[in-house]
């Protein structure tokens, strides 16, 4: 799935040194020029094919560690120290540059085999730095495929077992879901009016006569939005931004945004702790799954609660195949949660 913007790193992670990353199994080096603007190049010096990311920044250019060749933000070689005054830099002395956009704390790279269209923009995180809202980040790298990581983040039925007691308990009530496809993904509305309020988050966030709302959304190419509303004007929304590093390695940046009235700023440390805890629990089961799939292959058996994830896989497959015609689908699915 090349023709999309992918997050490469958080802005705070790219400072005054080259930074290596990998997206879709492609090695990339990021660096900042003299003005602080971020750039992304193929992580390969054309001279003797070593990693530019092992070099250093010199006068706003990236310098190869092997022979000191320097490249600007466009990937063009601007200096070869061994050249005499009359010698010219070869026209082939360049490495490819990627389109790049830095916004809302992330550096996004266009991985396509063509230039992005005017309407093709990186994912915008709603409420980021908006008045009355707060946010925090958690991040990790998971040894499993991006498809399985996406499925985990949008899957409801595992939460009572992997995260039991934290924000849900083992299957105890009927969940009525409405699933629909849209051009950029899949939306799932979950109605849990009969849920028992015995999880930690329900006890803390819900008043006596209040209920909560829940909507999950998959956004192409690999972003999951999980949104909870608690009573009047209390919301917690998590954006799981998944980056396919290689077949069984997925990097994840999670931006949690929330508004809780006068508690919005006070609970920031708690949100961070809970976010880290939930992610650690997901890592454990996903890496267990990844190891089994590596050995035996991926052989899944599905039940009704897996409908949304099956549709997400279908959506991603259609995108990989370049299917342009959008055929809307919708379905009501009930299961115990």
Image (cartoon, helix red, strand yellow):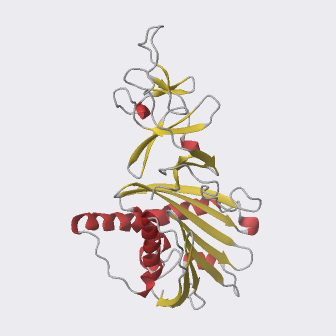
Horizontal and vertical percent position of residue 107: 57, 47
Res 139 visible: yes
Depth check, front residue: 16 or 162: 16
123 displayed left or right of 114: right
Horizontal and vertical percent position of residue 311: 46, 77
- Name the residue: 43% across, 72% down: 313
Horizontal and vertical percent position of residue 244: 42, 56
Residue 257's place in the image compared with 202, above or below, is above
Res 170 visible: no
Residue 84's place in the image compared with 216, above or below, is above
- Name the residue: 49% across, 77% down: 165
Depth check, front residue: 110 or 266: 110
- Name the residue: 62% across, 75% down: 228
The image quadrant of residue 216 is bottom right
The image quadrant of residue 148 is bottom left
Task: Identify the residue at the far top of this view.
Answer: 85
Residue 287's place in the image compared with 115, above or below, is below
Task: Identify the residue at the far left of this view.
Answer: 295
Horizontal and vertical percent position of residue 128: 68, 58
252 displayed left or right of 212: left
Labels in figure, total: 0
- Name the residue: 43% across, 81% down: 306
Depth check, front residue: 43 or 161: 43
Q: Quadrant of the N terminus?
A: bottom left
């Amino acid at each position: 799935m090349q023709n999309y913007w992918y997050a490469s790193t958080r802005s705070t992670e790219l400072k005054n040194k080259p930074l290596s990353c990998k997206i879709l199994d492609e090695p990339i080096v990021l660096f900042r020029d003299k003005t602080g603007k971020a750039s992304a190049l193929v992580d390969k010096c054309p001279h003797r094919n070593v990693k530019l990311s092992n070099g250093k920044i010199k006068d706003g250019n990236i310098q190869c560690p092997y022979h000191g060749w320097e490249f600007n933000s466009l990937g063009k070689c601007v200096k070869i120290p061994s050249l005499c005054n009359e010698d010219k830099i070869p026209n082939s002395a360049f490495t490819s540059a990627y389109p790049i956009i830095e916004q809302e704390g992330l550096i996004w790279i266009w991985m396509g085999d063509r230039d992005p269209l005017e309407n093709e923009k990186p994912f915008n995180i709603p409420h980021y730095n908006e008045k009355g809202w707060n946010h925090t980040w958690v991040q990790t790298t998971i040894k499993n495929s991006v498809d399985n990581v996406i499925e985990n983040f949008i899957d409801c039925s595992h939460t009572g077992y992997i995260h039991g007691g934290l924000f849900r308990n083992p299957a105890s009530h009927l969940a009525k879901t409405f699933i629909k496809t849209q051009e950029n993904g899949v939306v799932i509305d979950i109605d849990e009016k009969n849920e028992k309020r015995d999880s930690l988050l329900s006890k803390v966030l819900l008043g006596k006569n209040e209920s909560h709302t829940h909507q999950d959304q998959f956004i192409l190419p690999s972003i999951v939005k999980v949104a909870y509303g608690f009573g009047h004007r209390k919301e917690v929304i998590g954006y799981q931004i998944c980056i396919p590093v290689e077949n069984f390695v997925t990097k994840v940046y999670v931006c949690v945004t929330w508004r809780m009235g006068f508690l919005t700023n006070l609970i920031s440390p708690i949100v961070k702790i809970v976010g880290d805890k939930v992610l650690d629990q997901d890592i454990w089961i996903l890496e267990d799954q990844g190891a089994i799939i590596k050995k035996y292959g991926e052989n899944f058996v599905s039940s009704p609660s897996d409908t949304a994830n099956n549709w997400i896989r279908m959506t991603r497959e259609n995108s990989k195949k370049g299917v342009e015609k959008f055929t809307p689908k919708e379905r009501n699915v009930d299961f115990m949660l």
